[in-house]
């Protein structure tokens, strides 16, 4: 997949210049005061030329509680296009400082077996062998094992059959930790949910949240399900969600078969192609991955849009299987490392550096 901050998505029947809240003078690398009618998408469009506002959300997580609703007068820091919070900051310098600090820490003489970690391709910018360090989430995992007092070796493999992580690799002990998965928000009503959600609720242990991704709804501009405002309005729709991806967001809203038809291709790009052919009405994809998938399908430019009325925050976690006797220990190590990384700023630095590298790939 490729991703471009310069690519413009055209909203149905609305010229970009007419969108409320778009200030032509707004630039990246500067603070911005929210005005009435602004949305994160319109602010991102003014700053970057793209409605992908995930980077703005990442930089203002402690300020933004609901990405669908911004309060006028809120001051947001708009990151530079390369992810720096200001023109004078340097995310790579933060990473280098933490790596130097780690290198000076005393090493344990007690042997501990390497932790066996697995991820997969096809989920850029989050994971992918072609990306720096294996992608953003893989970098967070491998770094966490050497932060927070940790000093653990690891083995890392990529298995692109994501479903096999649950079905075979984790329960049989071939791997200890899988990178990375959405955790269901509610496990209280398993009788009325899908099998994937039940599995996650009953068979897996989760780390602390490592990243919050915006779950976005993608449609063609002329689809009857474009711009709906309530999940219930999806009744009868054909919804595309790549195989192995969580269905909890849908089932939590009562959207299970036969109320809807769920399509499970292998990749997000296939979901976008299904939108273009009419095989699917809506593709449920994370904001960054969906934008990357749209850019991979040339005929989708100007014809695939985001529904700005419906989006949710989905927390992403590292997972172990409950049958792994050391699984909780490994998650504790990862959590300790992540906590230190958040305090030092390295967590954001790795995310910004990963996105900057990925944006260059797509430019």
Image (tube, helix red, strand yellow):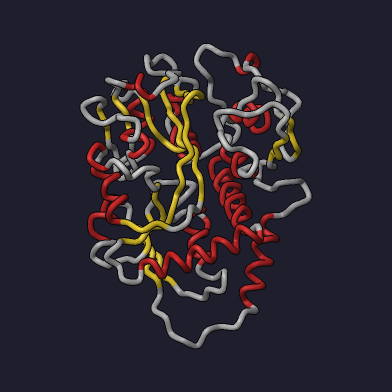
Residue 143 visible (yes or no):
no
User: Residue at the location (37% across, 68% down)?
Assistant: 116
Query: Residue 327, how many percent across, how many down?
Result: 36, 67
Left or right for 250, reference 145: left
Is residue 171 at all visible to an observer of this figure?
A: yes
Q: Is residue 176 above or below residue 212?
A: below
Q: Residue at x 69, y 26 (%)?
A: 72
Q: Is residue 79 left or right of residue 230?
A: right
Quadrant where the C terminus lies? top right
The quarter holding residue 240 reads: top left
Above or below 305: residue 250 = below
| Residue lying at the far right of the rendered structure | 88
Q: Quadrant of the N terminus?
A: top left
Farthest residue to the front: give it. 188
Asked whether 132 or 59 is in front, the reply is 59
Tally of marks? 0
Q: Position of residue 152 (x, y in %)?
A: 48, 74
Q: Residue at x 47, y 58 (%)?
A: 138
**In the image, residue 123 lies at what x, y percent?**
42, 46
Residue placed at 27% from the left, 37% from the top?
264
Counting from the top left corner in percent of width and height, residue 210 is at: 50, 53
| Relative depth, front residue between 15 and 245 | 245
Q: Quadrant of residue 218?
A: top left
Of 215 and 130, nearer the camera is 215
Identity of the residue furthest to the top in this view? 13
Q: Quadrant of residue 314?
A: top left
């Amino acid at each position: 997949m490729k991703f471009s901050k310069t690519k413009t998505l055209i909203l149905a029947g609305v010229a970009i210049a007419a969108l409320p809240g778009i200030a032509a003078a707004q630039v990246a690398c500067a603070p911005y005061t929210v005005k009435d009618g602004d949305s994160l998408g319109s602010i991102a469009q003014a700053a970057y030329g793209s409605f992908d506002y995930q980077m703005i959300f990442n930089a203002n997580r402690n300020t933004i509680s609901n990405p669908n609703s911004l309060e006028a007068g809120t001051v947001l820091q708009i990151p530079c296009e390369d992810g720096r919070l200001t023109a004078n900051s340097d995310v790579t310098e933060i990473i280098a400082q933490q790596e130097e600090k780690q290198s000076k820490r005393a090493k344990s003489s007690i042997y501990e077996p390497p932790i066996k970690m697995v991820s997969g391709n096809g989920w850029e910018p989050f994971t992918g062998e072609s990306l720096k360090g294996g992608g953003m989430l893989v970098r967070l995992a491998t770094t966490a094992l050497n932060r927070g007092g940790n000093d653990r070796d690891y083995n890392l493999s990529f298995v692109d059959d994501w479903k096999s992580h649950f079905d075979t690799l984790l329960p049989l002990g071939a791997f200890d930790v899988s990178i990375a998965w959405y955790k269901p928000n509610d496990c209280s009503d398993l009788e009325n949910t899908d099998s994937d959600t039940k599995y996650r609720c009953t068979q897996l242990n989760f780390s602390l949240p490592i990243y919050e991704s915006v779950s976005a709804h993608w449609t063609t501009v002329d689809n009857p399900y474009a711009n709906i405002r309530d999940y219930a309005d999806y009744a009868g729709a054909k919804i595309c969600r790549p195989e192995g991806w969580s269905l909890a967001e849908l089932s939590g809203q009562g959207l299970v078969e036969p109320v809807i038809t769920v399509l499970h291709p292998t990749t997000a790009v296939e979901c976008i192609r299904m939108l273009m052919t009419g095989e699917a009405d809506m593709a449920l994809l994370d904001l960054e991955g969906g934008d990357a998938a749209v850019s991979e399908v040339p005929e989708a430019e100007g014809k695939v849009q985001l529904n700005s009325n419906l989006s949710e925050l989905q927390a992403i976690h590292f997972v172990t299987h409950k049958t792994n006797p050391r699984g909780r220990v490994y998650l504790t190590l990862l959590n300790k490392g992540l906590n230190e990384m958040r305090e030092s700023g390295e967590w954001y630095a790795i995310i910004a550096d990963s996105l900057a590298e990925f944006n260059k790939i797509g430019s």
